[in-house]
Image (spheres, helix red, strand yellow):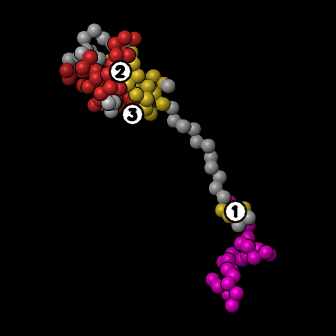
């Protein structure tokens, strides 16, 4: 609300002695401040694919592309890692997402009759 001929704001709750709004919680020097609490980041989980002697390499590459969104080159590299060392990381996700992807791998493998297994491990 403007008062008189001067361009001066009058605060509804009154004003301080120097013409500034009175001190309010969360205000410093007339500027609103925000207190930010540190929020812990949620844990991440690796989805691991395990090698077996029966699942075709092409099927593993397809799983990595379709379920994990990997490009052909990345999917091939991960598949070769699985083949050579016995397991490989398909991706890192929040727990619920990781568990959903593991279930999708098992469903797709079972539909095709392959024993491909996946698991979740905390990062």
* Residue found at x 80% / y 75%: 17
- The x and y percentages for residue 41 are 54, 37
Q: Is residue 54 left or right of residue 96?
A: left
Q: Is residue 83 left or right of residue 92?
A: left
Which residue lies under the disc numbered 2? Answer: 77
Tally the marks: 3
What secondary structure is the magenta-colored segment mainly? loop
Callout 2 secondary element: helix
* Residue found at x 26% / y 25%: 62
Using the numbered discs, state the Cα–Cα distance from disc 2 to disc 1 in whole angstroms: 55 Å
Which residue lies under the disc numbered 1? Answer: 27
Q: Quadrant of the N terminus?
A: bottom right
Asked if the stretch drawn in magenta spans residue 52, the answer is no
Question: Residue 16, relative to residue 114: is it above or below?
Answer: below
Kindly give the residue lying farthest to the bottom in the view shown: 5
Look at the image and give the residue range highlighted in magenta. 1-26
Kindly give the residue lying farthest to the front in the view shown: 73
Mark 3 Cα-neighbour bin, 10 Å: few <14, some 14–19, many ≥20: some
Using the numbered discs, state the Cα–Cα distance from disc 3 to disc 1 in whole angstroms: 41 Å
Q: Nearer the viewer, residue 39 or 62?
A: 62
Mark 2 Cα-neighbour bin, 10 Å: few <14, some 14–19, many ≥20: few
Mark 2 or mark 1: which is in front? Answer: 2
Which residue lies under the disc numbered 3? Answer: 97
Q: In the rendered image, which quarter is residue 56 located in?
A: top left
């Amino acid at each position: 609300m403007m008062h008189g001929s001067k361009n001066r704001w009058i605060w509804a709750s009154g004003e301080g002695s120097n013409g500034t709004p009175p001190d309010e919680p969360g205000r410093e020097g007339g500027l609103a401040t925000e207190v930010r609490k540190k929020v812990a980041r949620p844990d991440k989980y690796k989805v691991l694919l395990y090698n077996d002697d029966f699942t075709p390499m092409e099927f593993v590459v397809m799983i990595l592309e379709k379920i994990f969104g990997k490009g052909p080159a990345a999917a091939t590299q991960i598949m070769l890692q699985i083949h050579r060392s016995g397991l490989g990381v398909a991706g890192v996700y929040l727990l619920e997402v990781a568990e959903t992807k593991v279930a999708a791998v098992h469903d797709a493998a079972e539909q095709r009759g392959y024993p491909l297994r996946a698991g979740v491990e905390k990062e």
